[in-house]
Image (cartoon, rainbow, N blue to C red):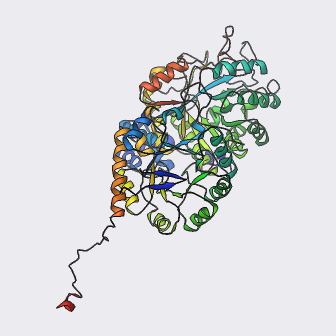
Amino acid sequence: MSFFTIVEQYQDFDFTGFFDRVTDAEVARSLSREKLSAMDFLTLLSPRAAGHLEQMAQRAHRLTLQHFGRTVQMFMPLYISNYCTNGCAYCGFNHKNPILRRTLTLAEIEAEARAMAATGMRHVLFLTGEAPRVTPMAYLVEAARCLKRYFASVAIELYPLSVDEYRQLAEAGVDSMTLFQETYDQEVYRRVHLAGRKRDYHWRLDAPERAARAGLRGVNLGALLGLAEPRRDLFHTGLHARYLERTFLDTEVAISLPRFNEAECGDFRPDYTVNDKTFVQFMTALRIFLPRAGMTVSTRESAEFRDRILPLGATRYSAASSTGVGGYAHKPAEQTPQFEITDTRSVEEVAAAITAHGYQPVYKDWDAIA
Amino acid sequence: MHNDALLLGGRTFTNRLFTGTGKFGANAQIPKMLAASGSQMITVALRRVDASAGTENILEFIPPGVTLLPNTSGARTAEQAVRIARIAREAGCGDFIKIEVITDMQYLMPDNWETLRATEILAKEGFVVLPYVLPDLPLARRLEDAGAAAVMPLGAPIGSNRGLETRPLIQMLIEHCRVPVVVDAGIGRPSQAAAAMEMGADAVLVNTAIATARDPEAMGRAFDLAVRAGRAAYLAEMAEQSVTARASSPLTGFLDD
């Protein structure tokens, strides 16, 4: 069994027709159910449900408060390499982009780790492009071991790995992984992933499952909203999360809602945009469908918007992010980031804003105990 | 009520409301809540404790005089729980330990089997072991035999605020356990805490309902009152409940004539 079976079930589903037929009464009914079915979830994602946004927000707020309290887990990303063999039409690290490529040495990783840890941050997420020859397993394992000396929790956002490779990283101290499917729409997926291993939709789709099987405690999913029809992608993201929750009872599942910034992506123009209102609808629908799922909001979102959505379901915030390679120990020369960040505040500033809203920024909520 | 103290792990507790440190909007609310509720024991997840103290350390918000009950949240096996307990002791958190072994992230049900194994090991090492379990009488017996200082059955899933859904099962523990029974998890409102105490629980542990209230301090006070009321009612030996009104002796009254 793979989540692909479920993707196939909805292959020919008439989403447009479904959305056209949703009534206000159906939205109200789905919203009042204790446990939502897949169709209830889809109902809450419909344009019709936008008229019920305040009620959705109220319920999402209560659920978030109940399961996560007034706390936000803080983490910091570290890019250790931007070499990439993939040709993703929307990405700054596309192998065709003539950008300065760098891979941090272990000594450089250590210097970055020291600078990051000095901010009080105890959870780190380290990232690479997909270039196994430049960043092979042996290097990733060493990077993980190095970071583990400075952080309580080490997470990865790398190219999809095998069960055995995930296991090696788990043994080196990695406890969770993030991997975005980008889009669940196979046709669009083919169109925007033009080169490299990433063209293999299926291999990527099953990666979170392989990671869970290898013993990583947390998996974080996401679709890059805007590539394909966003309601459909979000629906699949939710189903993917629920599939993983049910298949791996001991795995903590989290979801990100990355969307295109208007200013970014060079020549690439996404076919869809997700405005703030729809974003909030997505976030609250997800929270109601999956009350326990973590929800990660990155610095792609603006400071003002991040502060506002705090009570609606968000549970994890990155801060002071650099999306170029390194960037914490020494500011590198002009670099192309993977994507543009919008919230450029320091860790203290983000923490102060969270506190001002009556929430507690949590720096440490994990210990690896072998 | 003066002699109604709870003895647990060699300590005397005059307040039967145990509290927790999770989910607060600010750690500074914790000492205020403790003062308002009078709670004398508070649990803290060791995973949240940051000894490196680049940021604030949650332990600094727990006043001296309040017994620290570190918990093994995050453990998925007995071995992990044992390691966390030892780390807690080495970190100066004392000998009390709440064993929490959870292998299911959806309902957060305690794994009774792993919890029993951890209890067996830690009790031998001299810990005051408070295992968090699904209420199950045969298991409770084994926990007692293994040296548990109390048993902590859940009323409902953690954070669910659904109250005493496992009431009949907890009742069995209260009737038959030799060690104190502390109802932990699921208590969402003071009336439910009072109900647990009325039925004879020795104490209750409440976190989510207090920490996520609009005013945690006032809610701590409310829970204190409820726990005292429930305890007083239990000690006063309440009259039995009945669904119908009872005339004095409708069937046998004639015998006195």
Q: How many marks?
A: 0
In terms of depth relative to the viewer, which is nearer, A341 or A78? A78
Q: Residue at x 61, y 59 (%)?
A: B112
In terms of depth relative to the viewer, which is nearer, A330 or A323? A330
Q: Residue at x 40, y 57 (%)?
A: B4
Relative height, residue B90 to residue A361 (above, below) = below
Outermost residue to the top: A333
Query: Where is residue A85, by image quadrant?
Result: top right
Q: Position of residue A191 (x, y in %)?
A: 66, 29
In terms of depth relative to the viewer, which is nearer, B164 or A251? B164
Query: Where is residue B192, by image quadrant?
Result: bottom left
Q: Position of residue A16 (x, y in %)?
A: 48, 40
Outermost residue to the front: B3
In terms of depth relative to the viewer, which is nearer, A96 or B147? B147
Question: With A222 as the anchor, is B3 left or right in this view?
Answer: left
Relative height, residue B36 to residue A261 (above, below) = below
Q: Position of residue B151 (x, y in %)?
A: 54, 58
Q: Position of residue A212 (x, y in %)?
A: 68, 44
Relative height, residue A7 to residue A190 (above, below) = below
In the picture, the quarter occupied by the C terminus of chain A is top right
Residue A320 appearing in the image? yes
Q: Residue at x 42, y 54 (%)?
A: B162
Residue A48 appearing in the image? no
Question: With A277 as the anchor, is A197 left or right in this view?
Answer: right
